[in-house]
Amino acid sequence: MKHKTNAGGIHKNPLGPLVLPVYIPALIYAIGTGAITPVLVLAALDIGFNEAESSAVVGVFGLIGVIASPPLGRFISRIGDRAALISAGIVTCLALLLSVGALVVGTTLFARSSFVIALVLIALGANIWQLGRQAYVAENIDPAWRARGLSTLGGMNRLGQLIGPAVSTALLGLWFLGSPFWFAFVLSAIATLMIVVFLVPAEPPTVVAQNLGKKPSPQPMRGEQAAAEKTVRSVFATVIMGVGLNAISILRSNRNVIVPLWGTYLGVDERIITATFAVSALVDSVMFVVSGGLMDKHGRLAALIPSLTVMPAGIIIMLAWPTVPGFVIGACVLGFGNGFGAGVVMTTGADLSPVHNRANFLGLWQAIVSIGTAAGPFIASGMTHAIGVAASLWATAGIGIGGAIWVALLIKPAYRRLGIDLRGRPLNPQGQDPNLANE
């Protein structure tokens, strides 16, 4: 692959200008949200919710992702990426303060209501941050680097979710239950301040294309018939990719359910289960470096197929080798497979999105791919209750393999109908897919 070089012949990485305005704030923000994730249920219990109510309250996060993403996408398109990110940061900070206040007040109706409102606002802020940063990166980076740009963004989120809980554990040992919320407040404020200082408003797509030395993609919407044909192509591609990406969403969300369930079923010590989770998450987090390069060089299938096959392979290892070593190795393989898909949801969303009002589409896309995230644990729970833990694991593995077959057969025609190859680049004039050609 040919990279841009400066006058001295040194390779210029286009991700560099995004470090201060995007990647570092994303990491800081993710560490903060990661710090409160393990204590949300504990906080809900502390202010008077029972066990079932606490689980339902925390489930607000998944629900917001499905319901609120489309209007949030329109909101971002209307006011711009930068303004939306700053607004979301301010709302998140206020919501975290409201959470601390609810914990201080204690077991009252006012405290419980305040806590639920705070969680809704935190979830809204997190969704705006995700959509706004995704749109900004997609609009301000060469398509040849799109997957690496977005997988790096996904990697920052994963690293934050790995570091945050560790910090939260240390804080709880030193301070009180509200300390992770104070910590998240400080980090959210720092991340928002970095957006204010370093993030410049996104340029119009035409200007971005000119800055990259490329002509803007032609807009073939001439007349109602052309517009209708383009809409049909876009809907077709979105449905195809939505089904395939929801298979990954189900695998990812079910991992948090089936791994501890299977470990408990086998009688594995709780400390080994949690340690295995930590190692699996670490393997998962560092894989974003590999994932983005694979997608940019070899196409989106280079990440989708390994992710949708290696994750089921990890589940099958746990089932076929029902011992502690089999459990540990299988869970780590599951994390390794998930790492292949780092950034793939955001990258395919950017591929499918229109040049104009990109955030509007990405909000809809986020809602589509969040269906699997929200439904996955209920699928696993229902299967476990109906026919047992092992059957739940087999069903989850089957969903992954089915998703792999689906995208392997249908992603190329879906992308071709949009006029792009599997790396998100325009097809050549003959309509051929140069995806596997040497660069």
Image (cartoon, rainbow, N blue to C red):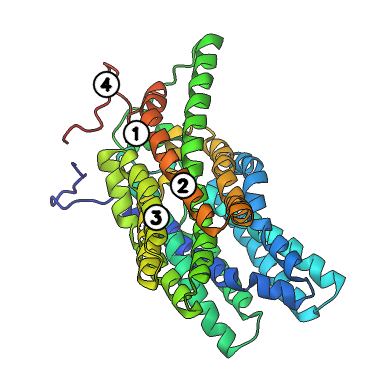
**Extreme residue in the right direction:** 109
Mark 1 or mark 2: name the one nearer the start of the chain.
1
Q: Which residue is mark 2?
A: 248
Gap in angstroms between the C-alphas marked 2 and 3: 16 Å
Residue 76, image x and y in percent? Answer: 59, 44
Q: Nearer the viewer, mark 1 or mark 2?
A: 2
The reply to whether residue 146 is in sight is no
**Residue 409 position by quadrant:** top left
Gap in angstroms between the C-alphas marked 4 and 3: 38 Å
Gap in angstroms between the C-alphas marked 4 and 2: 28 Å
Q: Is residue 272 above or below residue 10?
A: below
Q: Which residue is mark 1?
A: 210
Residue 340, image x and y in percent? Answer: 35, 52
**Residue 316, disc:** 3
Q: Say what amino acid the circle numbered 4 marks.
A: Gln
Mark 3 or mark 1: name the one nearer the start of the chain.
1
Gap in angstroms between the C-alphas marked 1 and 4: 25 Å
Mark 2 or mark 3: name the one nearer the start of the chain.
2
Residue 100, image x and y in percent? Answer: 70, 75
**Residue 49, disc:** none
Q: Say what amino acid the circle numbered 3 marks.
A: Ile
Q: Say what amino acid the circle numbered 2 marks.
A: Ile
Mark 4 or mark 3: name the one nearer the start of the chain.
3
- Please tell me which residue is depicted at 44% across the width and 39% down the height of the picture: 402
Disc 1 is placed on an element classified as helix
Q: Which residue is mark 4?
A: 432
Disc 2 is placed on an element classified as helix
Q: Is residue 255 above or below residue 372?
A: below
- Please tell me which residue is depicted at 43% across the width and 47% down the height of the picture: 137
Asked whether the residues under the numbered discs 4 and 3 touch, taking CB atoms below 8 Å apart as contact, a structural biologist would say: no
